[in-house]
Structures are given as structure tokens and as C-alpha cells.
Image (spheres, rainbow, N blue to C red):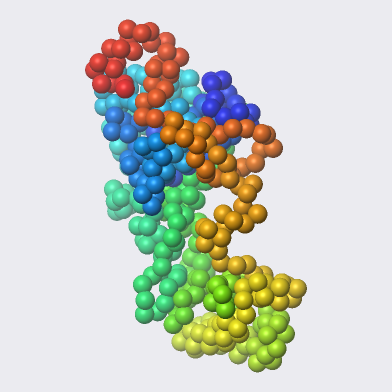
């Protein structure tokens, strides 16, 4: 509905998105829509999105945390106190002129604030409404904090790595938040397409738990049909459900990931006929104890061979045999690799330019990504678009309804 946009991409030009989210899953979903050209208006409370004070490795740029800058690029920011009726009136005016709204309040909070789907649908029947929660909107976990590590742990994901006598091993990145952000984006865009066809919006509900479970759809479905847990082992496998040769091994000068390999091919590569028959020695999966012993034995034999060669030697040796391998790199290695260069961009900011990742969706357009907004940076601009004159805007500021 709005032609204003802070991205030169034309894909979602004219689409207005209201972003009432904090942390990562919601802001990343709406940042993706901003990358595609939508006019995303981020609505923050007077306290602001707490991720403004959530630096990664202590890094701040121009007074803002790196997390906030990366997750809120290209948006316009306004500051409203939604507990005040005058602020709700502003939100309702925005809703009337918008296409998509994304929020990640805990279940029932939106209704208390009068910004639930039923209320806003009466204002704009075409509005697509996406609600992101931690665990869904029913069940005993509804009011528990939905955070990436907690959901990884609750969903079984963290238990799929690590050793039998060690700690479960969660992902080192916020993978559940990221996957939930994709679900939210897909829901929003699917709803927008439907609304253009039917003239009616709808509410979509996604959760961090649903995202965590979908990541594990193969493993959980296998368990539901067999009742059998894959064994944790003495060796720290990448996943208890992925058996050797799959995994990460220490080389003479670093580490190597082996994704797909047949034991006969490894036997040829290392000149060890004993490797060729390892698959035939594997006991049935139902014999969990024996299967665990076989896994540790097979991985140990492969590790002994891999440790004799440098990473580069192994890539050159294994790749021609159709064994899928890659080096295990640090961020320093990655940053120096030519393959990484197209995925980096530089964004202008009041505190000076900063480097970050380019939008993940390549639209074929050349465009400049804009930085995240300062708290309340665009409040007056948006209020003016809604018809509030200078005096009315000043009155809203005086009461604290807007900032």
C-alpha cells in the first residue's frame, strides 16, 4: 500500500510491513522483507528492542549493538507506548494502510494490548498477521520463555551431538531463531499472495519449537515409528543419527569434514583394504550396544588415516574418488576465502561504515542496503504520513505516547 521503501529492490515495492518484534526470529524475518523492497516500519516501546543492548563479542557500532544493526537493516523506526490509547490509535491508522504485521509477543499479550488479529482484522480485513511464539499457543509450556538454546534443548536437538559421558552439544549459532524467521517470512508472503487474490487476510502462527522440530523431521519421524534412540558414543559425532564416515576429523594441520563417502573408496584412498569391509561388519540398528561399538571402531580407523595428511592433501586425494569433503574453517579462514567475497556488503552508518552480510536472496538488482534505525528515528516522518500535524505530533511526544 505504501510506496515508501528503504531498499532499491523492486520485488516487494509498495508492500508495507509493520514489525512489532524483538530479539532475532521476528526482526530477521522482516529484515528479509526489507531486503526485497518492502517498507518495513519497526515499532518499538520507549525502552526499545532489547537487542540494541545485545552486542556479540562486545562489538558496538555508533552506540548500537552489532545484533540490532544486522537484524534491523533497511527499516524505518518509530517509538510508541502501546499501553496508551493515543498510541494504539496511531497503530490502528498504520494497520489500515499496511499489508503485513509481524509480532512476537507471548501468547495473550497481544490481546491485552488490543493488537490481536481479531481486533486488527476489523480495521483492515486484508491484513496478513504473523504471530511468532516460543512453543505455540497451547500446552503447559505456553508461558515459558522461548529462547533458542532453551528450545534446542527442549526439542531434543542438543541431545543429538556430544559423547555418551559428556554434555549434550547445542548448535553454536541461533539456528532455531533463523529457521523460525524463514517460517515467518514464508507465511507472510504466502498470506500476501492469498490476500491479493481473495481480498482477505488471515492469521498465521509459527513458533520456535515448530522450527526446531522441522529441522529434525527425519530423526523424529524415525523415532516415532521405531521407538528407538540412536546411541551416543565415545566419539563426538556430528549427530548421533549420522554414522561414520560422516563427521569431522583432525588432519595433520587442521580439520576435515567428510559428508558422503563409501568405505571401499576410503580403502582405495588410504591404501587400507580393511576399510572396505567395515560396512559389512555393521550390526543391526536394533542392537544398540553393538552398533555403538562398531561406530566408534569405524570412526577411529578413519581418524588414524586422516591424521597422517594435511587438509589440502586430503581434499586432493579424496575428491577424485567422489568423496565429499571440505575444510573446517574459522571465520578468519572464511573471510580470506575468495568464495566469501560476493556475500559481503558495506553499510553506511552515522558511526561510520560497517561490513556485514549481503541480503541472502539475490534478486539480480544492484542496490544499496540501508542501516538500522535509531530508536524513534522515523516517528515524526511516519506520523506526518498518517496526517498528524506539527501540533498533534508535539502533543504525542509531550505525553510520551510517541517518541
Q: Residue furthest bottom?
A: 274
Rendered location of residue 112, percent (x, y): 28, 32
Rendered location of residue 80, percent (x, y): 32, 25
Q: Is residue 80 left or right of residue 371?
A: left
Residue drawn at x 37%, y 46% as measured from the top left = 55
Rendered location of residue 99, percent (x, y): 51, 26
Q: Is residue 69 left or right of residue 182?
A: left
Residue drawn at x 30%, y 27% as measured from the top left = 82
Residue drawn at x 57%, y 82% as measured from the top left = 307
Relative to 7, say whether 345 is above or below: below
Report the number of discs: 0
State the image quarter where residue 36 is shown.
top right
Q: Is residue 360 left or right of residue 214?
A: right
Relative to 139, say whether 399 is above or below: above
Relative to 359, say whether 93 is above or below: above
- Quarter of the figure that contains the N terminus: top right
Q: Residue furthest left?
A: 399
Q: Residue furthest front?
A: 352
| Closest to the observer, 344 or 353 | 353
| Closest to the observer, 365 or 30 | 365
**Residue 195 in sight here:** no
Rendered location of residue 393, percent (x, y): 34, 13
**Residue 2 in sight here:** yes
Residue drawn at x 70%, y 82% as measured from the top left = 269
- Quarter of the figure that contains the C terminus: top left
Amino acid at each position: 500500500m505504501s510506496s515508501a521503501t528503504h531498499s532499491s529492490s523492486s520485488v516487494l515495492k509498495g508492500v508495507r510491513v509493520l514489525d512489532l518484534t524483538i530479539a532475532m526470529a521476528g526482526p530477521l524475518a522482516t529484515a528479509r522483507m526489507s531486503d526485497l523492497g518492502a517498507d518495513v516500519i519497526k515499532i518499538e516501546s520507549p525502552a526499545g528492542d532489547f537487542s540494541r543492548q545485545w552486542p556479540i563479542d562486545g562489538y558496538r557500532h555508533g552506540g548500537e549493538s552489532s545484533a540490532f544493526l544486522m537484524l534491523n537493516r533497511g527499516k524505518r523506526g518509530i517509538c510508541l507506548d502501546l499501553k496508551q490509547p493515543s498510541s494504539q490509535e496511531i497503530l490502528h491508522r498504520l494497520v489500515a494502510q499496511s499489508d503485513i504485521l509481524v509480532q512476537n509477543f507471548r501468547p495473550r499479550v497481544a490481546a491485552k494490548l488490543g493488537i490481536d488479529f481479531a481486533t486488527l482484522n476489523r480495521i483492515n480485513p486484508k491484513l496478513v498477521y504473523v504471530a511468532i511464539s516460543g512453543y505455540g499457543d497451547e500446552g503447559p509450556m505456553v508461558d515459558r520463555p522461548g529462547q533458542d538454546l532453551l528450545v534446542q534443548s527442549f526439542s531434543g536437538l542438543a541431545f543429538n551431538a556430544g559423547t555418551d559421558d559428556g554434555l549434550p552439544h547445542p548448535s553454536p549459532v541461533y539456528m532455531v531463531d533463523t529457521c523460525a524467521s524463514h517460517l515467518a517470512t514464508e507465511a507472510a508472503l504466502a498470506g500476501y499472495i492469498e490476500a491479493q487474490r481473495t481480498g482477505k487476510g488471515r492469521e498465521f502462527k509459527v513458533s520456535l519449537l515448530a522450527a526446531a522440530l522441522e529441522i529434525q523431521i527425519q530423526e523424529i519421524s524415525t523415532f516415532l515409528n521405531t521407538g528407538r534412540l540412536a546411541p551416543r558414543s565415545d566419539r563426538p559425532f556430528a549427530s548421533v543419527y549420522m554414522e561414520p564416515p560422516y563427521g569431522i576429523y583432525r588432519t595433520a594441520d587442521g580439520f576435515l569434514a567428510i559428508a558422503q563417502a563409501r568405505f571401499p573408496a576410503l580403502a582405495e584412498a588410504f591404501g587400507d583394504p580393511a576399510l572396505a569391509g567395515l560396512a559389512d561388519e555393521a550390526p543391526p540398528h536394533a542392537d544398540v550396544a553393538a552398533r555403538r561399538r562398531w561406530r566408534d571402531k569405524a570412526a577411529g580407523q578413519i581418524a588414524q588415516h586422516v591424521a597422517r595428511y594435511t587438509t589440502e592433501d586430503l581434499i586432493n586425494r579424496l575428491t577424485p574418488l567422489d568423496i565429499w569433503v571440505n575444510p573446517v574453517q574459522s571465520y578468519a579462514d572464511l573471510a580470506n576465502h575468495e568464495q566469501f567475497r560476493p556475500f559481503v556488503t558495506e553499510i553506511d552508518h552515522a558511526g561510520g561504515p560497517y561490513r556485514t552480510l549481503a541480503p541472502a536472496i539475490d534478486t539480480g538488482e544492484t542496490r544499496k542496503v540501508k542501516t538500522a534505525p535509531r530508536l524513534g528515528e522515523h516517528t515524526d516522518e511516519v506520523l506526518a504520513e498518517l496526517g498528524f500535524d506539527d501540533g498533534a505530533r508535539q502533543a504525542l511526544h509531550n505525553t510520551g505516547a510517541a517518541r
